[in-house]
């Protein structure tokens, strides 16, 4: 069943990928703010924030694909 596959496999993998990217981006921006409050840090923050959208979309799409590939490799197919 397609809906069942989506809810059991694709959605959790997509969410895991998105939360991984979110954690990485938030921690990176926070550390840049903590250790360097110059204008160059603000420029990097803007660049990272723009890149964040592409990373989230990529993670949401690619994470389930990678999981499916790794499961097949584990089974030896």
Image (cartoon, grey):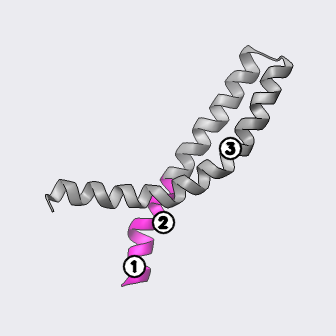
Q: Secondary structure at mark 3?
A: helix
User: What span is colored magenta in the figure?
Assistant: 1-16
Examine the structure image and report whether residue 13 is included in the region drawn in magenta.
yes
- Are there few (<14), some (14-19), or many (20+) residues within 10 Å of tag 2? some
Q: Which residue is mark 1?
A: 4
Disc with the residue nearer the chain's start (3 vs 1) = 1
Q: Looking at the image, do the residues carrying marks 1 and 2 touch, with CB atoms under 8 Å apart?
A: no
Does residue 27 sit above or below 74 in this rendering? above
| Residue holding disc 3 | 51
Q: Quadrant of residue 3?
A: bottom left
Is label 2 in a helix, a strand or a loop? Answer: helix
* Left or right of 60, for residue 70: left
Residue 40 image point, x, y percent: 81, 21
User: In screen coordinates, is 35 left or right of 71?
Assistant: right
Residue appearing at x 21%, y 55% in the figure: 73
Q: CA distance from mark 1 to mark 2?
A: 10 Å
In which quadrant of the rendered view does residue 46 lie? top right
State if disc 1 and disc 3 touch (CB < 8 Å): no
SS for dot 1: helix
Give coordinates of residue 32: x percent, y percent. Answer: 71, 22
Quadrant location of the C terminus in the rendered image? bottom left
Q: Position of residue 48 (x, y in %)?
A: 70, 37
* Main secondary structure type of the part rendered in magenta: helix
Q: Measuring 35% from the left and 56% from the top, which residue is drawn there?
A: 67
The residue carrying pointer 3 sits among few (fewer than 14), some (14 to 19) or many (20 or more) residues within 10 Å by Cα, namely few
24 vs 9, left or right, is right
Q: Is residue 63 above or below residue 47?
A: below
Label 2 sits on residue: 11
Mark 3 vs mark 2, CA separation in Å: 22 Å
Q: CA distance from mark 3 to mark 1?
A: 32 Å
The residue located at (82%, 27%) in the rendering is 42
């Amino acid at each position: 069943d397609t809906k069942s596959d989506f809810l059991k496999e694709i959605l959790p993998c997509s969410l895991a990928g998105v939360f991984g990217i979110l954690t990485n981006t938030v921690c990176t921006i926070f550390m840049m703010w903590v250790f360097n409050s110059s204008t160059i840090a603000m420029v990097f923050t803007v660049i990272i924030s723009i890149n964040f959208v592409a990373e989230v979309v990529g993670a949401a799409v690619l994470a389930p694909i990678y999981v499916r590939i790794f499961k097949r490799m584990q089974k030896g197919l």
